Amino acid sequence: MRFFGARAAGSIGLAVAIMSLARPTVASAQSRSGTPPAVGEVYGLEIGASWWTADPLGVITSERLGLIGSDVDFQSDLALSATRFRELHLVVRPTTKFKIRFQYSPLKYDASTVLERDITFSGIVFPVSVPVNSSFDWTVWRTGVEYDFLHRSRGFLGVLVEARRTRVEASMMTPGASLVDPAEVSITRTAWLPAIGVVARGYVMPKLAIDVEYGGSSIPKIKNKYSGHYTDFDVHATFNLTNNFGVQGGWRKVHTFLDIEEDTGDVTFQGPWFGAAVRY
């Protein structure tokens, strides 16, 4: 797959560096089997919520009725801006090295602006100087399995294989009677994307862990109608107050490209996030 580029190499290198922090000392290595796990590493179920302030970057294009769609820029054309969203995740851990992971990420942006140029979207021409209300929804359901092939009491290095269901909905409308027929147009697309990645965790302090996760995929053109690729990079810290509760904070960047029939989206979401996790 093509997503293992320079950034992937850098992420893997960072993961290896983190794992070096997690390596036990010579003295502890002699009694590795008796080394207790770090605080926060004894659990079978983890439930977490986070708040991600994601800045939207990119363009979306929709062609209809023989009219070539404009490359509609989220910020310069639609005035979409960074917004805070809530994400939910669930981790089931039947064994020490094996995890089943779920994540729900609903992102929704709304904005109002006055167009500074003519825009053609989904077969409708929105002329310059017309006020426009727009919305963009990006919702992802992640389901995956993680296997930590290198596991120590103070960290791990593993692989993640998952499937991502991405649903995209975009709409533009003019308030009042600026455009009579129609006053609103929208598109909705759904795509499944597989993924493979690397995950790593290392404890730099007894209760403070650093996590790095990088994954992605690249799907070639299928039947001349569908193609896509994405990358997801996340680095964050977790401070475990107890074995059953921890607070988290980090930075995440997700880039997604989807080309489905007449619609194309090339978007990036990036920004800081914070959250908490409860474990049992």
Image (cartoon, rainbow, N blue to C red):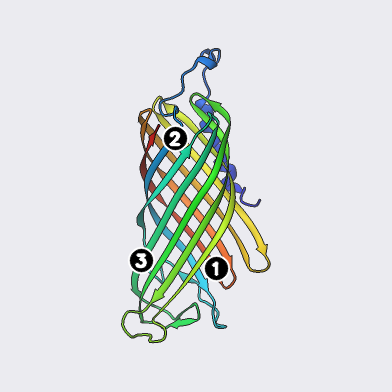
What residue sits right under mark 2 in the picture? 45
Q: Tell me the residue at 46%/42% (across/down).
A: 235
Q: Give, as a three-letter code, the residue at label 3.
A: Asp
Q: Which mark is residue 253?
A: none
- Tell me which numbered mark, 2 or 3, is placed earlier along the sequence: 2
Q: Tell me the residue at 50%/42% (across/down).
A: 101
- Tell me which numbered mark, 2 or 1, is placed earlier along the sequence: 2
What residue sits right under mark 3 in the picture? 110
The x and y percentages for residue 255 are 51, 56
The x and y percentages for residue 174 are 36, 79
| Cβ atoms at labels 2 and 3 below 8 Å apart | no
> Which SS class for mark 1?
strand
**Residue in front for this viewpoint, 68 or 181:** 181
Closer to the observer: label 2 or label 1?
A: 2
What residue sits right under mark 1 in the picture? 264
Q: Give, as a three-letter code, the residue at label 1.
A: Thr
Q: Does residue 16 appear anywhere in the picture?
A: no
Query: Distance between the Cα atoms at labels 2 and 3?
Result: 35 Å
Q: Give, as a three-letter code, the residue at label 2.
A: Leu
The x and y percentages for residue 80 are 38, 65
On screen, residue 6 above or below 192 = above
